[in-house]
Image (tube, rainbow, N blue to C red):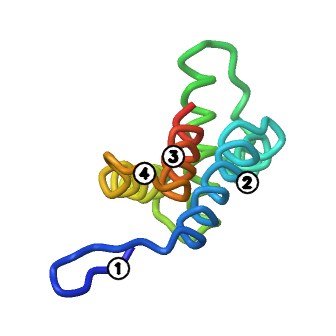
Amino acid sequence: MRAFDNQRSIYPGLEVSLLNFCVSFKNHVLTDSRIIMLGSHLGDEPEGEAVVDSIDGVYNESKSAYSMLAKLSGFSNMQEVLEIFATKLVQNLLTSNNTQDQEHIRIVDLSLDVLS
């Protein structure tokens, strides 16, 4: 999206590419158990005391795995990554509101696919 003379316009091809990246990131990083295990192993303490046998422990291990993956991506935590995605989705939904253009409809559909 770009602003020009207080009006916003979008580049549908760019928006579709960004949303495809969001869908791929969600499917291949946030929900792939192999990637989560990789982040978990990279974030293990040197003593190797990361053995977990409770639900709270599993949550904490997954949280640390996501934090490690975010750090590998150049962010301090996964919250920053998700905020970027959320901002982009809200912008797409707001700028594509009440339009019947096929490109805008596709952008809305992809935005909703990221959320599902």
Task: State the separation of the CA atoms marked 4 and 2.
Answer: 30 Å
Name the element at disc 2: helix
The picture places residue 109, in percent across and down from the top left corner, at 55, 42
Three-letter code for the amino acid on which mark 4 is drawn: Leu
Of labels 1 and 4, earlier in sequence is 1
The picture places residue 44, in percent across and down from the top left corner, at 70, 46
Of labels 3 and 4, earlier in sequence is 4
Q: Quadrant location of residue 22?
A: bottom right
Three-letter code for the amino acid on which mark 3 is drawn: Ser
Name the element at disc 3: helix
Q: Tell me the residue that label 2 is attached to.
A: 42
Q: Nearer the viewer, residue 43 or 36?
A: 36
Q: Tell me the residue that label 4 is attached to.
A: 89
Task: State the separation of the CA atoms marked 2 and 1.
Answer: 39 Å
Q: Nearer the viewer, residue 83 or 45?
A: 83
- Name the disc covering residue 111, or none: 3
Q: Tell me the residue that label 1 is attached to.
A: 2
Q: Residue at x 59, y 46 (%)?
A: 66
Task: State the separation of the CA atoms marked 1 and 4.
Answer: 15 Å
- Callout 3 touching callout 4 (CB < 8 Å): yes
In this rendering, the label closer to the viewer, 4 or 2: 4
Task: State the separation of the CA atoms marked 3 and 2.
Answer: 31 Å
Of labels 4 and 2, earlier in sequence is 2
Q: Is residue 77 above or below residue 4?
A: above
